[in-house]
Amino acid sequence: MSGSALFDTFARAPLAFERGDGSWLVADNGRRYLDFGAGIAVNSLGYSHPHLLAALNEQAAKLWHVSNLYEIPGQTRLAERLVASTFADRVFFTNSGAEAIEGAIKTARRYQFVNGHPERFRTITFEGAFHGRTLATIAAGGQAKYLEGFGPKADGFDQVAFDDVDAAENLIGPETAAIMLEPLQGEGGIRSFPTQSLRRLRDLCDQHGLLLIFDEVQCGVGRTGRFFAHEWAGVTPDIMAVAKGIGGGFPMGAVLATEAAASGMKAGVHGTTFGGNPLAMAVGNAVLDVVLEDGFLDEVSRKALLMKQGLASIADEYPDVIEEIRGSGLMLGVKCRVANATFNAALREEGLLAVPAGDNVVRLLPALTVTDADIRDGLDRIRAGAKAVSASLASAAN
Ligand SMILES: *Cc1c(COP(=O)(O)O)cnc(C)c1O
């Protein structure tokens, strides 16, 4: 938009939405869109979920914010519930994914510091990673396009090729503190680390006294059909960063850690003004009420299968447009043979919203509450989008 007062940091589609209901968004021109992007995996329970609305409204009438100088019962409760359902013993709440990652990195460095290894501060990461946009998290992500023009890359991050565990092993040195990865890369193009690699990384960390950090900001909180994606592999981290889906649309994140890994994080060492405020905690607890309900995650897996099978048959029909379908649960990627932006635009023409990713992939991240009918409707739109792109390829060839 020319003359906009905003930073030009986003190449925005010329679309503005007024309201949402379930998996549907209504634009200000009245057109309805089926949203398979869900705010990039943030709106985990869709729009206007009655339980989240009630929790937010009830808390809003009582208290919005109190400082972390005082006890916040909603924080204690949410932390206890996260601890009860994961590997973790301790939780620190943040406002965003990048802050959760920064908190995770700081937790690992402090662990080494208080355990007699102040020289260990480096973190090994993997190519294609996305860990956020702060100065430390762009260094951790290691992507040139996000680092360029922001001065020297923050020290303390070493990167190896995606899934190259041998290279990671070779890179471990006297200054290494941690290894960090997304078990299922989101922005990198829906790429999963094989279970075998996760096991080997766990073993390497144990052998060398390093901490294993999982970034489950995008793949966590039910997205893959388990509460956290690493549960599929049966490999647990020492520290985990969570955000996006845990707030169901309310900005929040968390660092989860074992008792040992959190041992350096004492009073005054780290902090936040907004993190864990009562509004965020009310919504986070309400999200867990739904996601941890008996059978909810099984339903995610069932619907995911429906979706993946449908996508596979569309890929068979249009091999000129789609190379493969990848991903896990309701975190799926369409690897394109045409430019992913072209396919994404074709989907939007059909009234379906998706999210481009690296490696020429279009991400499909519907709300975990997506209905079977919405999945069938979405598959019809995706097929129509693939057909339109295929037709334009054919006419360009003639
Ligand atoms: C989105 C994302 C982040 C950064 O989260 P923000 O809330 O945008 O700071 C970090 N890691 C992963 C895997 C993400 O998908």
Image (spheres, rainbow, N blue to C red):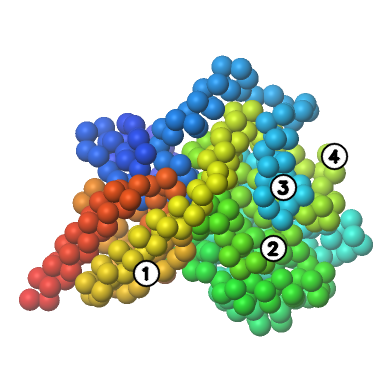
Query: Could you say whether the residue bearing mark 1 is in a helix, strand or loop?
Result: strand
Tell me, for residue 267, which label it has, or none: 4
Mark 2 against mark 4, which lies toward the viewer? 2
Query: Disc 2 and disc 3: Cα gap in Å?
Result: 13 Å
Looking at the rendered structure, the kind of residue marked 2 is: Thr
Which residue has dot 1 on it? 325
Q: Earlier in the sequence, mark 1 or mark 4?
A: 4
Q: Earlier in the sequence, mark 1 or mark 2?
A: 2
Looking at the rendered structure, the kind of residue marked 3 is: Val
Mark 3 against mark 1, which lies toward the viewer? 3
Which residue has dot 3 on it? 83
- Do the CB atoms of the residues marked 2 and 4 lie less than 8 Å apart? no
Query: Could you say whether the residue bearing mark 4 is in a helix, strand or loop?
Result: loop
- Do the CB atoms of the residues marked 1 and 4 lie less than 8 Å apart? no
Q: Position of residue 333 (x, y in %)?
A: 40, 64
Q: Earlier in the sequence, mark 3 or mark 4?
A: 3
Crowding at mark 2 (Cα within 10 Å: few <14, some 14-19, many 20+): some
Q: Position of residue 148 (x, y in %)?
A: 53, 60
Looking at the rendered structure, the kind of residue marked 4 is: Ala
Query: Disc 1 and disc 4: Cα gap in Å?
Result: 47 Å
Closer-to-camera residue (151/389):
389
Query: Disc 1 and disc 2: Cα gap in Å?
Result: 27 Å
The quadrant where residue 283 appears: top right
Q: Earlier in the sequence, mark 2 or mark 3?
A: 3
Rendered-image quadrant of the C terminus: bottom left
Tell me, for residue 2, which label it has, or none: none
Q: Earlier in the sequence, mark 2 or mark 4?
A: 2
The quadrant where residue 195 appears: bottom right
Which residue has dot 2 on it? 236
